[in-house]
Amino acid sequence: QVRLSEYGGGLVQAGGSLRISCAASGFTFSITRRDMGWVRVMGWFRQAPGKEREFVAAITLNDGNIVYGDSAKGRFTISKNNGINTMFLQMNSLKPEDTAIYYCAATKPFPKTTTSANSYDYWGQGTQVTVSS
C-alpha cells in the first residue's frame, strides 16, 4: 500500500526559506527501474484558498529528470534521497503568494514525467505553508 506523508510546513516571512519533505512507503525509490520505458514520477502541487491545484515540481525516480512549474523556477529545488525514500522541496525567496497547502503526489508506472494532477495516483494529506508579508 502506497502512503505519502508530508511534513515541514509552517509560517515564514517573505524572502525567507523553507524545506518541506515527503516520506513515501509502499515502493522503494532506489530500485525503481524503467520498465518498458515507463517511469514512476513524484511531484509537488499546491492549492491556495479559492484557487485550483497548481503544479509546482516533479522528479522522475528512475533517472532524476526534473520539471518545474513557472512559479517555482529559479526559487524552488526538488530533490530526493533514495536511502530514506523521501522527496524534498527547498523553497527560497518565498512570497506571500506562495501561501498554500502543499501536496506530495506519486504516479504508478507512467510513460513520462508528467505535470498533470490527473496523472498522479497517490496523494499525501498536505502541509500548510504560510508566507507573511
Image: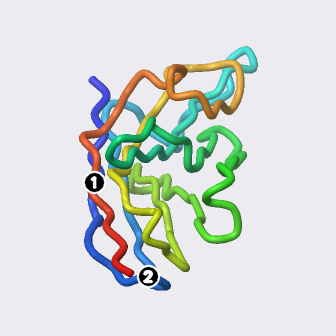
Q: Is 110 situated above or below 57?
A: above
Q: Position of residue 96 (x, y in %)?
A: 43, 70
Pointer 1 local density, CA inside 10 Å: few below 14, some 14–19, many at least 20: many
What amino acid type should be assigned to the residue bearing mark 1?
Thr
Side of 41 relative to 25 (left or right): right
Seen at 65% across and 38% down, the residue is 62
Label 2: which secondary element: loop
How far apart in space, not on screen, are marks 2 and 1 (Cα)? 18 Å
Of the numbered discs in the image, which one, if any, rests on residue 127? 1
Instruction: Check the image and name the residue furthest to the top.
Output: 36
Q: Position of residue 131 (x, y in %)?
A: 36, 73
Of the numbered discs in the image, which one, if any, rests on residue 46? none
Please tell me whether mark 2 or mark 1 is closer to you in this view.
2
Of the numbered discs in the image, which one, if any, rests on residue 14? 2
Q: Quadrant of the N terminus?
A: top left
Q: How many marks?
A: 2
Q: Residue 39 is drawn in which quadrant?
A: top right
Q: Is 7 situated above or below 116?
A: below
Q: Position of residue 21 (x, y in %)?
A: 37, 59
Side of 129 relative to 30 (left or right): left
What amino acid type should be assigned to the residue bearing mark 2?
Ala
